Image: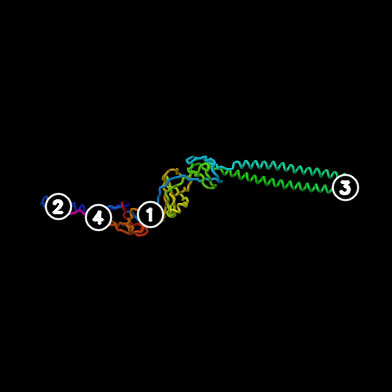
Amino acid sequence: MKKFAGAHIAAVMALAVAGTVFLAGCKEQVTEKAPELVDAVGVDMDTAEVVRMDLSGVVSYSAQIVPKIEEISFLSSGSIDELKVSVGDHVKKGQLLATLSGNSGKAKQLREEINNLKAANEDVNKQSLYDIDMMEENLKSLRKKRKAVKKAGRKQMDRQITEVEENIKIAEEKLRQQKELQQLEIRQKERELSEEQGTQKNGKLYSPINGEIVGTTGGSGYMVQGGNTAFQVANMEAPRLKTVYISNAKLASASQYVAVVNGKQYEVELEEQELSREEIERSTHPANTWFDFVDTSVDAKVGKSATLNLYTDAVENALVVPANAVFQSSEESYVYLVDGDAKTKVVVTTGTKTDAYVQIESGVKEGDIVYVEG
């Protein structure tokens, strides 16, 4: 800023004339009216030089540091059998939150069926092997008898031997197929058992983080759908920002989102804003807008306050003046150019504005001196 001081010459001269008249009156008792004081010609004023700098508009919003909310769901559908936690409870990573009422007896039943099948199959197979052994013993006996009979009777024995040999082959093939079918049945039961055990495992829900329960879908007996949110857990170790709702238009015009926490600046990114069906039908919007910190190691405690700055309309090498050098009427913006003691009103076109500076697009040039309202 520069100061221009004008000497109050006119005022001093007026006082000198008045003193002279007073002295003359003492001698000659002549009265004469004193001249009026005139305004000083040089009035102190604040000024600034028109300069160039990189400029970016800033829109600030009050913000609150809140925890990130993790939404947890069961993999399977069912009704809640036992709710282990309540809203407000602090939980640790890996802690059991709830279980679904499932067919816990079905797995036991399947195991029993598999064991019974294996035992029954073993008995059936033993009997088949016994039958084959008996036929083989019979075959040995027939072959032995064949050697003892006369040549004329051997044809009859050969037919009997051939018949027994065929029966043995049929019995062995039957046993092989029987075992294959038994294995198929057992494998099917084992798959059912594996699926049931997986279902039981999916029927248990554990917390993936350390945090606080802030929401549940319901208590014991409440039906839940696999994949749908059953619990909401606040992750106190993952802070984020909450502001009032900021329109998509304002967000889109910003080149950068910056959070100011305890005097430190952190870059943040916008969380996707989704409108519910009710909000769309009512042409309303969410109550809040949310931002995530880009740096996960920020010094930001949940529950504290912060400021969100939206940097908009960035201009490089802009021609700027102080914000209080620009005056506004209903029709135009203008500044006062200063030349010595004279001020000249000049209409200007403004661009990007901040709390401290205003971009001047036309009306003045770099190096001009403008009046700044104190």
* Residue 216 percent coordinates (x, y): 50, 43
| Distance of label 1 from label 3 (alpha carbons) | 125 Å
Q: Nearer the viewer, residue 209 or 75?
A: 75
Tell me which colouring the rendered structure shows.
rainbow
**How many other residues sit within 10 Å of disc 3, few (<14), some (14-19) or many (≥20)?**
few
Marked residue nearer the N-terminal end (1 or 3): 3
Q: Label 2, label 4: how many angstroms apart (C-alpha)?
A: 25 Å
Q: Which residue is found at the position 67% from the left and 46% from the top?
A: 185
Q: Nearer the viewer, mark 1 or mark 3?
A: 3
Mark carried by residue 353: 1
State the SS at label 1.
strand
**Amino acid type of the residue that numbered disc 1 sits on in the rendered structure:** Lys
Query: Neighbour class for label 2 at 10 Å: few (<14), some, many (≥20)?
Result: some
According to the picture, the residue beneath numbered tag 3 turns out to be: 153
Q: Which mark is residue 41?
A: 4
Between disc 1 and disc 4, whose residue precedes?
Answer: 4
Q: Amino acid at mark 2?
A: Val
Compare marks 3 and 4 and give the one earlier in the sequence.
Answer: 4
Q: Give the residues in magenta.
A: 33-42
Separation of marks 3 and 4 at Cα, in angstroms: 159 Å
Tell me the kind of residue under disc 4: Val
| Amino acid beneath label 3 | Gly
- In this view, the mark in front (1 or 4): 1
State the residue position of label 2. 21
| Residue 86 at x, y percent in the picture | 49, 40
Front disc: 3 or 4: 3
